[in-house]
Amino acid sequence: MRKCIYFIALAAFSLFSTNVMAQKTTKTFVIDAGHGGFDKGSNNGNIIESEYSLELAQKIQKLAKKKNINVILTRDENDHLDLQSRVNKMHELNPELVISLHLNSASDRGKSGAEVFIKNDNVDTHTEKIGTELAQLVSINSIENRGLKKANFKILKDSKAPTFLIELGFASNLTDAETLKSTHHKNQLAEKIVQFLENYQAI
């Protein structure tokens, strides 16, 4: 009888320990859908950055949930959230990684392709490697790879977590815009980003 009680207690403790470990190893990722509300961002009439970034962020969150990956969005609706509020939320959540989703625009309609930005003063080669990987990852179908760049954007500069701002393509370029608005392309982007999060190793 004592042996039976001992094994039951041991099993219960083992299950408890496994649950605690699982909770400790759960990683949180933040997906920031750029712009929102009255701030529409890039807009060529057929594709609006604020709506596009939110739709893609929601796709990523939905797919991530199926894989037990904890993805939190800075905004869940098409409303305005200023940059400081986004940064504050990122600090509060203390995520493993932040990805900010955007569409590019230029007066030169010939400019095209995807690019990834990291903070201007970054000197970490691992961060650069991950940024380069992300640029390759989102450069699919007809979207060319413009590579990794550095910038002094507030969301990069003020974030405490590793943060990558992705320009997914140019809304001002007819070829990019046609590809970007494709459901197939959006689904592929979401799948690739979730796969990236699933395999992510902390910086």
Image (cartoon, rainbow, N blue to C red):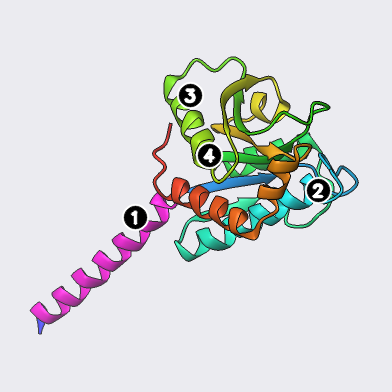
Which of disc 2 and disc 4 is earlier in sequence? 2
Which of disc 4 and disc 1 is earlier in sequence? 1
Amino acid on which disc 3 is placed = Glu
Amino acid on which disc 2 is placed = Ile
Element under disc 2:
loop
Q: Residues within 10 Å of mark 1 (few under 14, many from 20)?
A: few
Amino acid on which disc 1 is placed = Met
Marker disc for residue 128: 3
Magenta segment, which residues? Answer: 3-26
Query: Residue at image x 84%, y 43%?
Result: 43
**Residue 201 counted in the magenta span:** no
**Residue 24 counted in the magenta span:** yes
Q: Position of residue 136 (x, y in %)?
A: 49, 35
Question: Which quarter of the picture shows residue 110?
Answer: top right
Q: Residues within 10 Å of mark 2 (few under 14, many from 20)?
A: some
Query: For the view shown, which residue lies furthest in the right direction?
Result: 38
Instruction: Tell me the quadrant of the picture where the N terminus can be found.
Output: bottom left
Element under disc 4:
strand
Q: Alpha-carbon distance for marks 4 and 2?
A: 25 Å
Residue tagged 1: 21
**Apparent side of residue 185 relative to residue 155 in the rendered image (left or right):** left
Which of disc 3 and disc 1 is earlier in sequence? 1
Q: Main secondary structure of the magenta part?
A: helix
Q: Do the numbered discs 3 and 4 sit on residues whose CB atoms are within 8 Å?
A: no
Marker disc for residue 48: 2
Amino acid on which disc 4 is placed = Leu
Marker disc for residue 82: none
Which of disc 4 and disc 3 is earlier in sequence? 4
**1 or 4: mark nearer the eye:** 4
Query: Residue at image x 54%, y 44%?
Result: 140
Q: Position of residue 200 (x, y in %)?
A: 42, 42
**1 or 3: mark nearer the eye:** 3
